[in-house]
Image: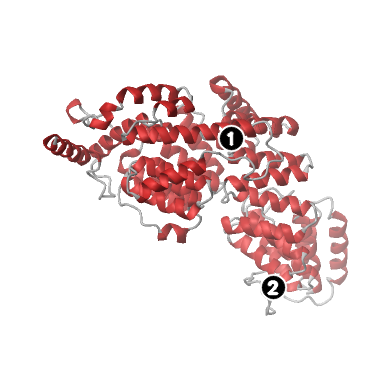
Amino acid sequence: MGLKRIQFLGAICRFCSVLFVTYGVTEFGDLVQIKKQLISVISLCKERGLVHSVKWASELAFALDPLPKDELPPSHLVSEEDVQDLDAFALAKSYFDLKEYDRAAYFLRGCHSKKAYFLYMYSRYLSGEKKKDDETVDSLGPLEKGQVRNEALRELRVELSKKHRAGELDGFTLYLYGVVLRKLDLLKEAVEVFVEATHTLPLHWGSWLELCNLVTNIEMLKSLSLPSCWIKDFFMAHIYTELQMIPGALQKYQSLIEAGFSKSTYIISQIAVAYHNIRDIDQALALFNELREQDPYRIENMDTFSNLLYVKSMKPELSYLAHNLVEIDKYRVETCCVIGNYYSLRSQHEKAALYFQRALKLNPRCLGAWTLMGHEYMEMKNTSAAIQAYRHAIEVNKRDYRAWYGLGQTYEILKMPFYCLYYYRKAHQLRPNDSRMLVALGECYEKLSQQVEAKKCYWRAFSVGDVEKMALLKLAKLQEQLTETDEAAQSYIIYIQEIFSCGEQLEHVEVSTALRYLGQYYFKNKLYDEASLCAQRCCDYNDAREEGKALLRQISQVRDQTETPSGELFVSLSDNNTPIKRVSPLNLSSFTP
């Protein structure tokens, strides 16, 4: 018996040398070894019913060159316990695949192998999840967090914690233990267990992904002690995307492409999502179109693609995408979200909300569906339902800035500025360089008569790249109200130059407001040439035409008097909290309406 055990342990060592040979190296020099590891972990995950990890590893393996026959990794080893449990495991796995989880767990009760124990515990967990979903499927709205729970979680935690203290959990069962802890909101313990799972079995993507969902900021990420292996680069790229550190994520994904994963549809989809997060819509659309050419029956991430088509108001393309996904699988969450976006673009908000509700019946933890349903309720002026939907989205993922921002907008409509300030701050913390969050914060501070903070927000919004071209205009109007005439004039000048330099049309709604103010400002400062130019430009706008003509008449009356030469617009600047640069007088001669 002792000799057999020694031979078995030797075989395990040889198998592990194949599976984990490059774990100590983060470079991608040996793609053959990476391919072998992927093939091995695909087999291990498939036996345990971890379908999402199988799919992820299979997509990566497909992106690499095929291995010759003599390079294929050996089939995984079978222990004596595995042999004893073989028949029961095969029977239970067949029930598991048919989603008869209680039945699978029943036939695995007396098994002793680690593989059978994992499937036994996993079946019990999924059985509890299925029962919980069945209870919540018809009553999404009024349920508070924690009212319906997986009843099996506490029992599973007790049993798994005993095994954990005894050091009897392998990488897969550690992953399951972490999931149970997360579901029980024991997040600190869950993080520790997932980190341990990545050390025990680095190639299991499920553990990395669960860990990613629990990391809340870059400081927490740096504090984690993670194994040094090639899969860590995929994790870092993914977590950078989740934490809105998009430049770092794009750099990581580019390195992975150069390392040999250029054919990976997973990487293409992640890069497209990253560009979507920084609102580089054209680049994201191009990548999604490329992705659909390579994988035309793909449904994953198509809801994000539909968001981009919605923003660009591309009705024909969105309609084609919706019809195409219905033909592939009409009962997928992503399909329902795409159809919801299509109806929303057509301003049929009741139908759109109905499809987002269908998506949530299929998956109550679908983040995008909760957020989009909140938007639809906002369009229908149903603020209480919108608040509830946004709160559900935050429960699913506290890093979803759109839900925080949506809550801020809802409370703004309800004229509750202190509430909306709180939620806008949360959104700003998640997206510190998003001008929309800063402008919203500025408006909030303005309503609360905190003008200094409002001015800082508007200027910061302009500095980080004002998407909607409204930050400087709001800053100028605020300065005008505070009788900071010189500063307001400078803000209006920069605003007009920004509007014209980016090629936008002159019918921009507030250009006439800026020109009116500058015309009067120049006139009061006896800069008649500049005042005349602004007045002439005012005549191009219906709402400012009469004021422009009146100003031109005033200028003509004083033309025969001594005119002050036009020099620098401002000789000195008064002290203020908004860092406005000195600028020359407005030059519109190169711009034509």
Q: Position of residue 558 (x, y in %)?
A: 86, 72
Q: Position of residue 396 (x, y in %)?
A: 58, 45
Q: CA distance from mark 2 to mark 1?
A: 69 Å
Above or below: residue 457 compared with residue 388:
below
Asked whether residue 463 is in view, the answer is yes
Above or below, comparing residue 431 to residue 524 in the picture: above
Instruction: Choose between 547 and 58: the one closer to the eye.
Output: 58
Q: Residue furthest top?
A: 327
Query: Could you tell me which residue is drawn at 46 percent across and 38 percent down?
Result: 269
Task: Classify residue 487 as left or right of residue 579.
Answer: right
Q: Is residue 95 above or below residue 444?
A: above
Q: Position of residue 387 (x, y in %)?
A: 72, 47
Name the image colouring. Answer: secondary structure
Residue type at mark 2 is: Leu
Identify the residue shown where x is 56% and y is 24%: 325
**Tag of residue 569:** 2
What residue appears at the point 56 percent right and 27 percent down from the top-left corner? 332
For marks 2 and 1 on the same chain, the one whose residue lies earlier in the sequence: 1
520 or 180, which is in the foreground? 180
Look at mark 1 in the image and give the residue it sits on. 132
- Viewer-nearest residue: 423 or 451: 423
